[in-house]
Amino acid sequence: MPYFMPEHVEDQRQTCRMEPNEEATQEDLNNILVQLIHVNFDSPNWEEQLESIATKFDMNHRDEVTINPQKMPDYQKKLEIFFQEHMHCDAELRVVREGSGYFDVRSVDDRWIRIPVKRGDFVYLPPGIYHRFTPDLNEHIVAIRLFRTNPKWEAHNRGENAEQFKERHEYLNAIKSH
Ligand code: KMT
Ligand code: NI
């Protein structure tokens, strides 16, 4: 289950809970339009479960990404990029097939909510939301990426050019009226 985390952490790959612990609620996620769904990869119909998610979000393509120090060229550099607070003009949809990690997303009041993900976890991050990703201490994750044709996944970092995109403003309006 997701929980709030401190603004500054020593090692991003650690759990990084508040002291005392502070869970995030379903409402906290609803407020920022983040959706979590579970796919049971051990069920014979996992492919159908995934198909129904793809249909729900109108995503007609998928590929797979493996993030671990052995398989990923420039691993350390990539980790820094994934963990830079950023947004995209398109939604980010990921299903974890193997391993685990953390997606961090900004709450309505601009605090970090940490979403631990492992095999079977699907995450929907809407266009324009500020977020980041890190592997955990196991440093291994394989994720399916769902997208439409030509996804706009270029990362726009907070504090750089992100605020100039209409998708960012549309997102802020969407969560305001929510
Ligand atoms: C991304 O776009 O940030 C990534 O693909 C990394 C997260 S997927 C486990
Ligand atoms: Ni991203």
Image (spheres, helix red, strand yellow):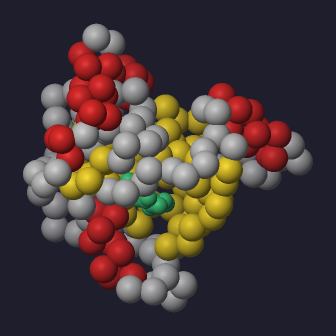
- When asked about the image quadrant of residue 78, the answer is bottom left
State ligand 1's quadrant: bottom left
Q: Is residue 98 found left or right of 5 in the rendered image?
A: right
Measured as percent of width and height from the top left, residue 148 is found at 60, 45
Q: Is residue 60 found left or right of 37 in the rendered image?
A: right
Above or below, 96 against 93 in this view is below
Note whether residue 18 is visible. no
Which residue: 17% across, 41% down? 163
Measured as percent of width and height from the top left, residue 59 is found at 64, 40
Judge by depth and name the residue closer to the eye, 114 or 23.
114
Note whether residue 34 is visible. yes
Which residue: 56% across, 72% down? 66
- When asked about the image quadrant of residue 25, the answer is top left
Measured as percent of width and height from the top left, residue 70 is found at 51, 88
Q: Which quadrant of the figure contains the N terminus?
A: top left
Q: How many marks?
A: 0
Above or below, 51 against 158 in this view is above
